[in-house]
Image (spheres, coloured by chain):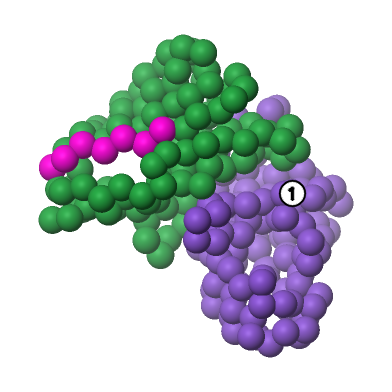
Chain colours: A green, B purple
């Protein structure tokens, strides 16, 4: 089934620095979803990208879908302690409706 | 309030003692799913259900059973738990219309299971 590579696995940043996580697929994707899981919490849907080259913004978060629809990125500008958590991408899979990346755990040092 | 509920939230048990983790959603969602989350491995799907009486294996179904007798409930059954099933379990639901990969998944709060 579909596999998606998410990098980096961990990222430690100083508060105020930027952060980016990437999801890469070997095949063309119809869409990609992003979720955030706070420490001790459950994954919560952030956004879905569908169109080639699509860029969507949510306050300090910028989501991008690659032109070839094989990769996506989530960029956070000027991180805050409230950004701490694990960010997952999720993509369609042949075996199951959705498969999740392994996630990027973000730590923010105040 | 629209939500997915799971019970129990925490469970410590012993090898071989059958257990059931319940999952219920009040959003009239057709699709429900179970995941386990382990450090470094992300979220891995155990079983999913497209609708009542329809269930399918996910990526890691061994040692688990599910049933979908009612639309709102999707219990996860461990007939003979083993220590390698110690994990954090999440139930999720979404609308079942069209391509499911386009539908937002709503997750329950999680069940932390320890099998001794």
Name the side, left or right, on which B25 lies relative to A77: right
Specify the quadrant that holds the C terminus of chain B. Answer: bottom right
Name the side, left or right, on which A57 lies relative to A41: left
Which residue sits at x=44%, y=26%? A72
Q: Is residue B10 above or below residue B56?
A: below
A39 falls in the magenta region: no
Q: Is residue A50 above or below residue B51?
A: above
Residue A2 location (% of width, % of height)? 66, 33
Which quadrant of the view contains residue B63? Answer: bottom right
**Quick check: can you spot residue A45?**
no
Residue beneath label 1, please?
B58
Front-lying residue, B47 or A15: A15
* Chain to which the residue tagged by mark 1 belongs: B
Front-lying residue, B62 or A33: B62
Front-lying residue, B99 or A99: A99
Q: Please provide the residue range marked out in magenta.
A: A16-22
**Quick check: can you spot residue A52?**
yes
Residue B57 location (% of width, % of height)? 79, 50
Which residue sits at x=67%, y=71%? B85
Residue A62 location (% of width, % of height)? 31, 28
The residue sitting at the right extreme is: B53
Which residue sits at x=77%, y=43%? B50
A21 falls in the magenta region: yes
Q: Secondary structure at mark 1?
A: loop
Which residue sits at x=53%, y=42%? A101
């Amino acid at each position: 089934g579909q596999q998606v590579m998410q990098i980096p696995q961990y990222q430690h940043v100083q508060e105020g620095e930027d952060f980016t996580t990437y999801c890469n697929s070997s095949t063309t994707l119809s869409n990609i979803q992003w979720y955030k899981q706070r420490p001790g919490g459950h994954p919560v849907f952030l956004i879905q990208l569908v169109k080639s080259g699509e860029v969507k913004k949510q306050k300090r978060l910028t989501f991008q879908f690659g032109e070839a629809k094989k990769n996506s990125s989530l960029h956070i500008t000027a991180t805050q302690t409230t950004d701490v958590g694990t960010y997952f991408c999720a993509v369609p899979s042949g075996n199951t409706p959705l498969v999740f990346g392994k996630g990027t755990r973000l730590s923010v040092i105040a | 309030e629209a939500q997915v509920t799971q019970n129990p939230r925490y469970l410590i048990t012993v090898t071989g003692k059958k257990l059931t983790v319940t999952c219920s959603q009040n959003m009239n969602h057709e699709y429900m799913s179970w995941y386990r989350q382990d450090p470094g491995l992300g979220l891995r799907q155990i079983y999913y259900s497209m609708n009542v009486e329809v269930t399918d294996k996910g990526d890691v179904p061994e040692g688990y059973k599910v049933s979908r007798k009612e639309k709102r409930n999707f219990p996860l059954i461990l007939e003979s738990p083993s220590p390698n099933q110690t994990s954090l379990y999440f139930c999720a639901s979404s609308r079942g219309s069209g391509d499911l990969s386009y539908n937002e998944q709503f997750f329950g709060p999680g069940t932390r299971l320890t099998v001794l």
